Image (cartoon, rainbow, N blue to C red):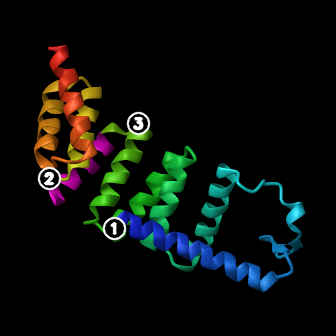
Amino acid sequence: MSRIRWIQLGAVLLVAGAAVVVILKVGNGHVADSGGSVRTPSMDTAKPGNPTADKEHELKALAVELQKKPKHVPILFRMAQLSRELGRPADAVTQLKQVVEVEPKNTDAHLELGRALYEINDLQGSIDQTKRVLELDPKQVDALYNLGAIYANLNRTDLAREYWSRAVAAAPDSDSRKRAEDGLRKLGAMK
């Protein structure tokens, strides 16, 4: 299982454990709010099964856990993932910067930070973080693909070809390799 999956699993278990503690402390189907007062489930405004509300709730629970364990990498990773899913890439950038501060050699964190920076239009930051991944792992196929895509979007077809060609050579069976091949075909048609 990849490092990100283990981190996500750890964060989910942490949140689930916190929820169980709250339920056991309050009991009787009542829930304590942040002010310490108790409300019944019928007083909740969020409907169960609402993915956005569920993500918001999880993000708030993780923020509470992060206060107890500042700079805890699994929590920060999951918060960044939720922030991106909720359309808040700037929040994800903040969380991922904390991860790379704690773990400067974490290629997954640099890769995700590069993606989040791209989403907020910090193209140079995105390029820098993605290149950092390649400094740590020169054959990291997702980073190679991402750099090719960034450069293709900047009309730097020479650099797009270079990185996508490296992606094709780096990992024969990966999705990023397949996307890089598609990108190379499209660039070939643009000659």
78 within the magenta span:
no
| In magenta segment, residue 130 | yes
Q: Residue furthest bottom?
A: 25
Alpha-carbon distance for marks 3 and 1?
32 Å
Q: Earlier in the sequence, mark 2 or mark 3?
A: 3
Indicate the quadrant where residue 22 lies.
bottom right
Vertical position of residue 25 compared to residue 51: above or below: below
The reply to whether discs 2 and 3 touch (Cβ–Cβ < 8 Å) is no
Q: Amino acid at mark 3?
A: Asn
Residue drawn at (46%, 56%) of the image: 94
Determine the CA span between mark 1 and mark 2.
19 Å
Task: Name the residue beneath numbered marker 1.
Answer: 1
Circle 3 SS class: loop
Q: Quadrant of the N terminus?
A: bottom left
Residue holding disc 2: 139
| Residue at screen point 54% across, 46% down | 88
> Label 2's element?
loop
Asked whether 162 or 42 is in front, the reply is 42
Q: Which residue type carries mark 2?
A: Lys
Q: Which labelled disc corresponds to residue 154?
A: none
Q: Nearer the viewer, mark 1 or mark 2?
A: 1
Q: Quadrant of the C terminus?
A: top left
